[in-house]
Image (spheres, rainbow, N blue to C red):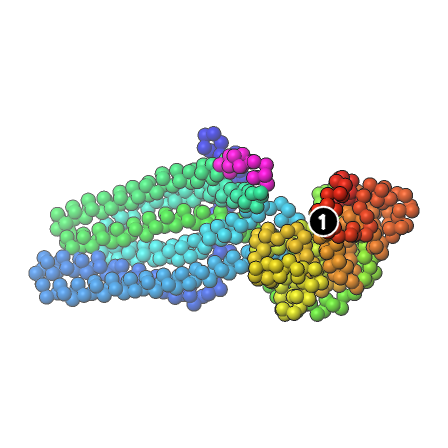
Amino acid sequence: MTNAEGRLPESMEEESDCDKVLSVMKTVWRVFAYLRRYPWMAAGTLTCAILSTVMVIVFPTVTKWIINDVVRGNHPEKLLPLILLASVAFLLQHAFNALRIVLNNTFEQKVIFDLRSDLYSHIQLLPLRWFDNRATGDLMTRVIEDVNSVERVLIDGIEQGVVAVLQIVIVLAVMFYLNTTLALLALAPFPLLIAGALAYTLTAHRRYRLQRRAASAMNALLHDNLSGVRQIKSFVRERDEHGRFNRVSDQLRRATLIVMRVWAIYSPSMSMFEAFGAVLVLGFGSHAVLTGAMQIGDLVAFLMLTAFLYDPISRLHQLNQLVQAGRAAGERVFEILDERAEPGFGVRRHVAALKAQTCLRTPNKQIAGDIRYENVSFSYAEGLPALKHVSFHAPPGATIALVGATGAGKSTLVNLLVRFYEFSAGEIYVDGRPIREYALPRLREAIGVVTQESFLFNGSIRENLLMGKPDASDAELWRAVDAANARGFIERLPAGLESIVGERGVKLSVGEKQRVSIARALLKDPPILILDEATASVDTATERLIQEALERLMFHRTSIVIAHRLSTIVHADQILVLDHGRIIERGRHDELVALGGKYARLCQQSLLEVSPEPELESSADIASLPIPVPDEQLPV
């Protein structure tokens, strides 16, 4: 993050002073838009701030009267009323402050909830291509830490800044009323204070931006290492990963030290200028008292007012630090909010679209599942096509199998149907209608997806199943569980459907997770089904259970199956053989075998039988089996 001399990298983009000021104002203005959602709370907070600030001037005034009139004027009868006046002023000041804090905290939590909600909602609407280039830990930092930093600008910065400015204005008005000369002397350090604040503000952004980036990098690495802790342990990489974490953590340390070193110069310098002003007031005020031009009570009151003047200025310096940190965080938050949502999800109507997903289940049943690709092409990167002029037709209820080597374009083909990515040429039709004419919630509600690595959320089995149909009854859940051949292992679990599966379903086996995923798809009841390597990485017995469940799931549904086991594709209505993004062969199993092309060669390499093997009943039977070889599966 920094070079050997501790300086910021030369590659960091430079901004003119005008651009920096405009950037600050733009970020603050966008933050301020969230405050306008609660005008009455903002007005109440500001009113309490004004009233508590007005009370500040009572004590210096009372002190002046006590010294001049009560002590030196020998009027003891005035002491008690003045003491009571000062006590009431203090009581009111702290009462208004207490009310302001309550309102402020409520206001703060409402605004921060809105900002974090908007950010998370928008993240959900961003295309998968955007996530491909983002680390999960970085996104978590933005949603949690950066939003909190923006909140400090929202509430602490604006609210306390307003209070500080009000106190400065009110105290200055009283000081000029009491003695214009001393008031001007108290203002003498102001040019230095303003110049120092500007110098700090105009140079702070790069420092805080580096600090936020370093924090994101560390969180991203931490997330990856915690997610891959099994791999780290299995490869005995604990020491290496510890060193890698320390290097990233050291970048954050150095970036933070740069911020602190500048602050260590800036803050004491501002305090020194303020002390210089107080010394001027004390010196000239004492001379005025000695010459009889001023009473001692007026000088004491003026010195107290001077303290009340410089105190909010010190708070403004502290707030300036918050604003600079919040500005860097705010830019990272609004950078996400400015990203374009997926085509088909309008940003202004995304909330309504998400709420509409449940009620769209009934209309989706009207979709028959007729799928047609016409000359579809797609590239992940310019000049590197993943699909080239792909065309095929899947009538309602048909099963289409995709076969090919790794990187042939199988997963890309189905990802385009769900619109995880947008194709660059050609057209995809569902029931004769281009898929881009469907609202994304409706299109995706009509498609069920079962993948090789079924993702389960860290909750109960019931919660994971209800993602398929949130309002499903227990009877519907168990029917889906039965159809997915999952009742046996679920009933063996201590809590049944309420059993917690752990992060990513870690407490279940691969086959168990797969069957829960199939049950979830059955509950969704989509007319179109995508099976992406759904029986890979499981043993033969588990495959049989999964295959039976899949047959029930595929019944009367248009299915696109990606598989490398012959038993899962041999009965498909049409098999498409892909190679480097093109369909090079198509037909039924028998036709392609007779053709003697690539598919026939893939089948010759496979030692799998078309039908499942009989269940083995003894360890002797298992021991008698030959050891499988890598060619046992079709390449993927």
Span of residues in magenta: 231-246
**Quarter of the image holding residue 172?**
bottom left
Q: Is residue 560 above or below residue 479?
A: above
Residue at the image position 38 percent from the left and 41 percent from the top: 263
Q: Between residues 198 and 595, which one lies in front from this camera angle?
A: 595
SS majority, magenta: helix
Q: Residue furthest left?
A: 74
| Residue at 72%, 56% in the rendered image | 545
For this view, does 400 lie left or right of residue 266? right
Residue extending farthest right = 594
Does dot 1 land on a helix, a strand or a loop?
A: loop
Residue 126 appears in the figure: no
For the question of whether residue 575 can be seen, the reply is yes
The image shows residue 221 at horizontal and vertical percentages of 54, 42
| Residue annotated with mark 1 | 618
Residue drawn at the location 36% of the way across and 63% of the way down:
100
Residue 228: give x, y in percent of width and height: 58, 43
Tell me what residue is drawn at x 8 percent, y 61 percent: 74
Return the residue nearer the eye: 352 or 304.
352
Residue 493, relative to residue 221: is it above or below? below
Q: Where is residue 403 shown, x and y percent of the image?
A: 80, 47
Q: Nearer the viewer, residue 308 or 591?
A: 591
| In the rendered image, the vertical position of residue 445 relative to residue 615, given as above or below | below
Q: Which quadrant does the C terminus fall into?
A: top right
Amino acid at dot 1: Ser
The magenta stretch spans residue 337: no
Answer with left or right where residue 469 lies relative to residue 316. right
